[in-house]
Amino acid sequence: MFYIDFGEDSVVVIKGRLDAAQAPTAQMFLDKITGQCVVDLGELEYISSAGLGVLLRTHKRMIADGLGLKLVNVNSHVNDIFTYSGFDKLFDIEPAGGAE
């Protein structure tokens, strides 16, 4: 299962598995965002390298526009993937529960 859409306060909500099969859908959705972007990953179960690539491309585009990509409600499993890949140094990440 995969879901991406706007939630409350224009926060992008991603649920399920963000893998190679879902990466094009996620990229198309995120490419339409022109302002500051907050992504809620609270119900993201899995992210592959293709999913990481989607977030990285979106982040680079937003940085070029003087904006940024903030990831919130990141569960410990997904946070570990960001840490192991070094992406924790690139993104503004707020772990689930608000604690770092």
Image (cartoon, grey):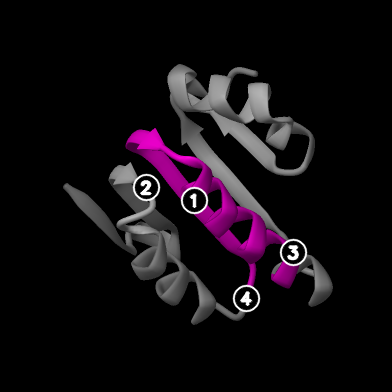
Task: Identify the image quadrant of residue 7.
Answer: bottom left
Question: Which residue is painted at 71% across and 32% down in the image?
Answer: 88
Question: Which residue is painted at 41% across and 73% down in the image?
Answer: 29
Q: Position of residue 35 (x, y in %)?
A: 62, 76
Residue 50, numbered label: 1
Q: Position of residue 67 (x, y in %)?
A: 75, 67
Q: Position of residue 87 (x, y in %)?
A: 70, 37
Which amino acid lies under the numbered mark 2 shown in the image of this protein?
Asp
Task: Identify the image quadrant of residue 12.
Answer: bottom left
- For the record, the magenta segment spans 35-61
Ranked by sequence position, the earlier of labels 4 and 1 is: 4
Tell me the CA gap for discs 1 and 2.
6 Å
Q: Circle 3 sits on which residue?
A: 60
Q: What element does badge 1 sit on? A: helix
Question: Which residue is painted at 46% across and 34% down in the image?
Answer: 73
Mark 4 crowd level (few <14, some 14–19, many ≥20, 10 Å Cα) = few
Mark 1 crowd level (few <14, some 14–19, many ≥20, 10 Å Cα) = some
Q: Circle 4 sits on which residue?
A: 35
Q: Circle 2 sits on which residue?
A: 19
